[in-house]
Amino acid sequence: MERFAVVPPFPEPFMRTAVVAAQDPPIAVRSGPVPPPVPERVEERRLTFGGFAYECRIVHQEAPQTQPLVLLGGSSQNRYSWQGHEKWLAPLATLVTVDLPGYGTADFLPARYDMNFLAGAVRHMLVEIGMPRVNLFGGCFGEVVGLRFAQLHPEFVERIVFCGAAKRLPDLYTDAVPRLTDTLERGEIDAAADGLVRLFMSNPGAGQVRKHAAVARLLHRQFLNQTPDEVRKAVEHNTRLMTHGCYEPLSVPAVPSLVFTGEYDTLCTPQMGRELAATMPATLFTTVKEADHLVTVERREESSELIGRFCTDRPIDDLPYCTPVESLGLSAG
């Protein structure tokens, strides 16, 4: 990033948690075998849970190597945000993305509805589309929902992968929410976008991050292009988190689990990821080099490979773009 207006920072690791991947600038493809063609059969389903309409997208794989992969992205990702990852993930498994109530194109969801409700919506979706057992990915806010889903409905979960994860709201976030809300209500979207990008991405001096300037511009533009409905949902999302929090110390199923983030993630820091991993059984932790909180955008192919390898029980301790894998779960003792 070259320059930012001097505005109060608005750290919100759980609000604007991703750039739509389909708009992400392409990354260079590493040498190796070309992935098989992505299957053509894509299904859209409109569902209703608790009186709120929501939508999911299913990319079917007729010859899967593992259970379906449910991708729960950040609060500003929608069900199309992972299209850029399908090149690497769809050959391995059926993919499911979703606009849960209160997000994307789903119905507005008042803040009185908490994470248990959203976890219930994930369960409702899986029952409706006939998927009794899945691999579960959650990125940032998707981790918050995914963890609660795994805690409340463990019978559905085969493996867990969390990215940009934390078990506590950062103080900077809780301090900034009132200022962010006031700025948005005054219509000062550009100022809010500047502060958001400045806090959401790592300081350029922290270390080398792939496509840092390009992703910063993309994030800024995406925030500026929000519709009034999206802004309203974003404000309600912050209220939901501030009201209900992001974590409950409930048991987590003892399934193979992985937590990772970018090595320069300054929002949900690597240490915060380690804290979460330590509360889960059978959990590994690593960081992706030359990336920050937006690791799945900055290093799209690499993060897809990491997720895909873990979900198909292939080794992840020999990946050149990852730091050494740590065993931090409860069973690691």
Image (cartoon, rainbow, N blue to C red):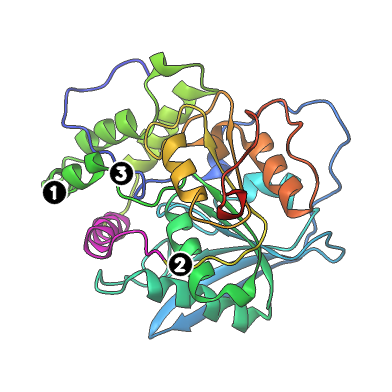
Q: Which residue is mark 1?
A: 178
Q: Secondary structure at mark 2?
A: helix
Q: Position of residue 76 (x, y in %)?
A: 41, 52
Q: Position of residue 243 (x, y in %)?
A: 22, 64
Q: Choose the circle earlier in sequence order: 2 or 3.
A: 3
- Amino acid type at mark 1: Pro
Q: Residue at x 68, y 47 (%)?
A: 307
Give the number of the disc on residue 148.
Answer: 2
Q: Residue at x 31, y 28 (%)?
A: 198
Q: Is residue 194 above or below residue 283?
A: above
Q: Which residue is mark 3?
A: 12
Q: Position of residue 272 (x, y in %)?
A: 41, 41
Q: Position of 28 compared to 285: left or right?
A: right
Task: State which mark lies toward you, 2 or 3.
Answer: 2
- Amino acid type at mark 2: Arg
Q: Nearer the viewer, residue 324 or 191?
A: 324
Q: Nearer the viewer, residue 54 or 317?
A: 317
- Rounded to the nearest angstrom, the CA distance separating label 3 from label 1 is 12 Å
Q: Residue at x 81, y 53 (%)?
A: 91
Q: Is residue 130 magenta?
A: no
